[in-house]
Amino acid sequence: MQIQNPETAYTLPPVDAAPAVARQVLRLAMGEHRYAIGIDRVREILKVSQLTALPLMPPFVRGVMNLRGAVVPVIDLGARLGLCEATLQRRSCVVIVEVIGHADRASQTLGLLVDAVHEVADVPAAGLELAPPLGTEIRVDFLEGMARLRGEIVPVLALERVLDEDALSHEIASHARIGRVLQ
């Protein structure tokens, strides 16, 4: 855009506007895998404390934790995505997220166990691209898109689909039925 100053009659150089930020994401690691989630769902990030295991749960349900008097289920995000189970180490974290429920249900607070949290990054408005239909490590419907961050392409997870209450309940119930048969 060119701006003319009437007093001096010369053209000022174009004003460089900062790119509009569409959203912010939190970069996570699960093993060697790097993903991001929308920061708007993140409530807090905690060091891993005591997790209480629950019987007959699938591997992605690591247990529950006490969060200021509330019992919060903890989901191993890598295991849920079919990548790898988290190994508890010094950098491991539980990311507390709030997932919007279906129309007739309230939102739900869950903990996501990850191997590391890296940073909060800005995704420019034009920086989120559609996920390719193949060539991804996880189900395409679990992806909101692909973001270009610090020179690499990082998949951005669609938490509402990854943590869909109906799908999780179905998988937990199926695993419990199989577990009872094997006992």
Image (cartoon, grey):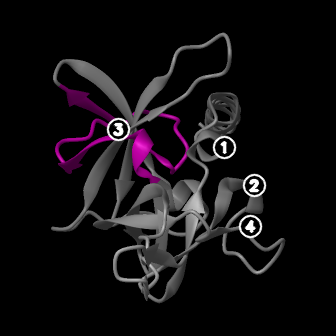
Q: Which element carries disc 3, helix, strand or loop?
A: loop
The stretch of residues the image draws in magenta is 38-67
Q: Which of marks 3 and 1 precedes in the sequence?
A: 3
Q: Nearer the viewer, residue 36 or 136?
A: 36
Q: Which dot, 4 or 3, sits closer to the camera? A: 4
Specify the label residue 114 is tagged with. none
What is the three-letter code of the residue carrying label 1?
Arg
Q: Which of marks 2 and 4 precedes in the sequence?
A: 4
Question: Which residue sits at x=73%, y=62%?
Answer: 139
Structural distance between the alpha carbons of marks 1 and 3: 24 Å
Q: Which corner quadrant holds the N terminus?
A: bottom right
Structural distance between the alpha carbons of marks 4 and 3: 37 Å
Question: Which residue sits at x=71%, y=75%?
Answer: 136
| Residue ID for mark 3 | 53
| Residue ID for mark 2 | 141
What is the three-letter code of the residue carrying label 4?
Leu
| Residue ID for mark 1 | 161
Structural distance between the alpha carbons of marks 4 and 2: 11 Å
